[in-house]
Amino acid sequence: MPATTAPILPSNDFPDWLSPIVVKELRQGLKSRAFVSIATILQGGMALMFVLAALSHMSPGGSGVDTLSGFFWFMLWVPLIFVMPGRALQAIAEETKVQTLELVQMTRMQSLRIAFGKWLALTVQSLLLVLAILPHFVLRYFFGGVDLVNDFTSLLFLLAFSMVLTASGLAASTLKPGLRIVLVIVSVGFLLIGGQVFAMISAFGVGGPFGGFSWPNSPWLGSLAAILLVAAYVTFFLLQAAGHLSTQVESYSSKKRSLALLSVFVILLAWILFTQSIIDLRILALLTPLVLWSVAEALVELNDPDWLIGHRQPLWNLPFRPGWSGGLFFALIIFAIIFAGVLLGSQPQDLETLRKSFVIFIGAVITPALFLIRMPRIKQRLLFYWLIHLLFALAFVVALLISTRPGLSDEIALAYLAPLPPATALACIEQEMDIDFIRTVFPVTATVTTILLAIFTLSALLALRPKSSDASIPS
């Protein structure tokens, strides 16, 4: 008798709707002790809170209602801001420890799909927790003194923030435990310096790119800004996680650089719309850390040996190819766009300060990377990039300590840092971008920056040149 095959039935079961990695993570996550415990505590705490509120006969607008609202939001903050991102921080580390991640990678599933599946599973669990407390959320309205519209908006922002933190925790979970601690310290320092730069630029007034930026008053513009910021940072962190998980076959450098390039265009567009149409989207300047981190990462990445000028790859793709040689040209494009935006949106009286400080900023960014191109054996290259920055920061601190000596001002002591662009950039920030101080250090710092940039460019072109052994390979 001829062999028969079983008929193919339509796939209507839940596991067939989603990616296998999402189904796997959801099944494991929903059965985990962490999720069951936090869901039970959340529901029990909410129920107890409202029972006590009902028994105490709270009056609308009284202090008891404020206490009730404070406890309500605290019960939400703990799982969404601490528990779920904390679980993401161990998501990939646990798989690596029990050696199950290799089994997933053997299925030839892309690293980005693995990272996205884990993030989506954790985000769905956060959504389930939020949906579970919605009855309690509405119940607060009957106690009075509650604006449901504003509270619902706050809940959405809290959930969006949780999504970003979960993605960042997932990216950090791909690192070794020691590197995670260092990454947290570096990130905090990076944000502090970025905040100082924002404050410095804000001194140039409302016409500047970040001067007095706040959340847009329009609900539509505010929602648009929130969606763009959340989407950009979630994508950025997932690409970081995928990049750490990827093998030699996969490379996410071009995707990360494309995201950074798109982000800098969005920042520039928001600035232009504000100056020309009074549409305040300057909150999108919060994409700046994403752009700067991508530039630093591109400048220290190891070169791709398979990329050669005039051989196998088009020249227009040069800024998006893996490695510091292509990363330099990517960084120059980013610098050019930012500089064009500075010239376009600044007040005429501020142009000299911004132009000269921008040159100092370029020198500060490329100087540590130039050291690393001679150290190809270093694996944690971005970490060493920030450590080199730390050495220049120590030189800045020493100069400040020397300036306390009698008869020596801090301007004179900090002026001796002019040959060191990273230390000079910190000195300019400490001097609150004083134009007289910038004029003092600029000739030396600009000369050093030009020499370093020329050396970097020449090294990049030489690294991209075809080797003699490849000359006979057809293009």
Image (cartoon, grey):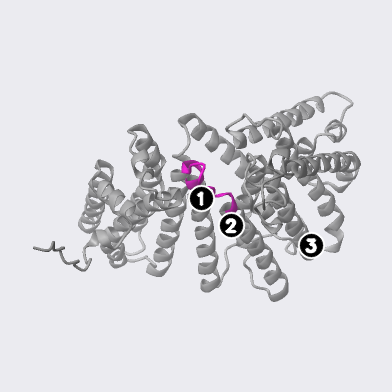
Query: Is 78 placed above or below 273 here?
Result: above
Cα distance in 3D space between marks 1 and 3:
34 Å
Disc with the residue nearer the chain's start (1 vs 2): 1
Of helix, strand and loop, which one carries label 3?
A: loop
Q: Which residue is mark 2?
A: 259
Q: Say which residue appears at 60% left-offset and 51% top-offset.
A: 290
Q: Residues within 10 Å of mark 3 (few under 14, many from 20)?
A: some
**Residues drawn in magenta:** 242-254
Q: Amino acid at mark 2?
A: Leu
Query: Which quadrant would the N terminus be assigned to in this image?
Result: bottom left
Mark closest to the chain's N terminus, 1 or 3: 1
Percent across and percent down for residue 332 are 74, 52
Please tell me which residue lies in front, 367 or 111. 111
Indicate which disc residue 239 carries. Answer: 1
**Given the image, on which type of amino acid does mark 3 rest?**
Ser
Three-letter residue code for mark 1:
Leu
Checking the image for residue 58, the label placed there is: none
Q: Is residue 83 visible?
A: no
Q: Nearer the observer, disc 2 or disc 3? A: 2
Q: What residue sits right under mark 3 in the picture?
A: 346
**Residue at 37 percent of width and 52 percent of height:** 117
Where in the figure is residue 225, as x and y percent of width and height? 55, 65
> Marks 1/2: CA distance?
10 Å
Give the structural element (helix, strand or loop) at label 1: helix
Q: Quadrant of residue 264?
A: bottom right
Q: Is residue 230 magenta?
A: no
Q: Is residue 226 visible?
A: yes
Residue 246 located within the stretch drawn in magenta: yes
Q: Residue 91's quadrant in the figure? A: top left
Label 2: element kind? helix
Label 1: few (<14), some or many (≥20) within 10 Å? Answer: many
Are the two marked residues, 1 and 3, in contact with CB atoms closer than 8 angstroms?
no
